[in-house]
Amino acid sequence: MSAVAHPIVDHNVPPGEPPHIHHMDTPTAYGAAKLGMWLFLGTEILLFAVLFCSFAVMRYYHLAEFHDASKHLNLWAGGFNTVILLISSFTAAVAVTKAQKGDNAGVVKNFGISIVSGFIFLLVKGYEYSEKAHHGMFPFVWNSDFYHYKNFLGLYFCMSGLHALHVVIGMGLLYWYGVRPAMNNRFSGKYYTPVELGALYWHLVDLIWIYLFPLLYLVG
Amino acid sequence: MAHSNSHSHGHEEIGHVVPESTFLKVLIALLVLTVITVLAAQVDLGKWNIVGALVIASVKASLVIAIFMHGKYENRIIWTYILIPFILLAIMIGGIFTDDPFRSHPLPFGAQGQQESAPAAPKASAHH
């Protein structure tokens, strides 16, 4: 047990604060939880990695179609959503600092902004999808004129749809593990693990969008 | 609540506290890089468009991991966990592209003698 935990604890216990018996559990648990979270985030990246590989291969073989099809995406909507996600990621990061300072109201406020941003993101995404459906560029309502865009649009819907699912899950995590406990003053400098892990998940959602936006909307 | 009693050198109980002003600077940098990506995509640089877009995206991703996700303050074990999926992704993409494009067939999954499994594949591509 200590073989795994030791380097993490060593790193996280500040100078002047020896790991006493009853303090030892907190940093150990904190380090282990964070390590587990990063492992999970790694699997998430690999989940999207498969789609990025498909995108790379399909783009290689259908370059002209990818260029044309990506021009049909709404650049303004995508750009707006990028800004929204970056801001929400910023507030999620700030929430961790607030939690570390024991400012539970700050956690509620900043995670609240992130959750509302996620909601706005989904609304814009829904608008984009309905726009595509209206023009027959959507699964189940394909207009045969756009048949040659199917490789691109199929990947677009898979990638952005899976990403949107992560936004929904992230909103739930921020609420259940961040906002709700913070309303009960649960967090302090000694305990804020759920806030940090929730924020990590939210940053991952942002991280994936950082790659999706230029690939889907800009260079196709 | 009792105040944390160790204020030494900006480190506190269990993790590193990053000041909010640092996050704000990173946010501004991310927004500026987003604008640069959009502007760069309006110029036709041929295949360098996607290279540029991916380089900028990677700079943004590094900022998010290093600062927003506290990666800068993490130890080697966590960095191993951070890097492995990216290495695997690079191997996967590298493996695909060192294999498939150098085969003789012009279209994916079709043609050239191996399996006859894809005669119905749409031929909408590669004629430009």
Image: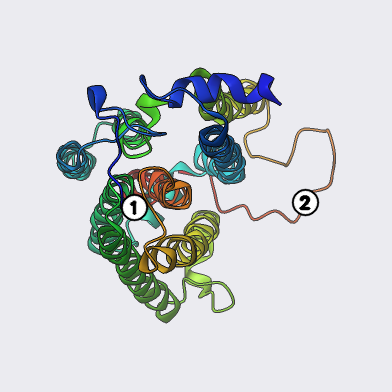
**Label 1 and label 2 in one chain:** no
> Which numbered marker is on residue A1?
none
Q: Nearer the viewer, residue A118 or A37?
A: A37
Q: Nearer the viewer, residue A70 or B30?
A: B30
**Mark 2 surroundings: few (<14), some (14-19) or many (≥20) residues within 10 A:** few
Left or right, A6 with respect to A1, comes to left
* Residue type, numbered disc 2: Pro
Chain letter for mark 1: A
Gap in Å between the C-alphas at discs 1 and 2? 32 Å
Above or below, B35 against A126 in this view is above
Q: Quadrant of residue B59?
A: top left
- Residue A137 makes an appearance in the image: yes
Residue at 27% in and 50% down: A98
State the image coordinates of residue A57 (x, y, percent, origin top left): 57, 38
Residue at 15% in and 42% down: B28
**Mark 1 surroundings: few (<14), some (14-19) or many (≥20) residues within 10 A:** many
| Residue beneath disc 2 | B119
Residue at 70% in and 53% down: B121
Q: Secondary structure at mark 1?
A: helix
State the image coordinates of residue A220 (x, y, percent, origin top left): 39, 47
Q: Nearer the viewer, mark 1 or mark 2?
A: 1
* Residue type, numbered disc 1: Tyr
Q: Quadrant of residue B114?
A: top right
Please state, as top left, top right, bottom left or bottom right, where the C terminus of chain B lies in the image: top left
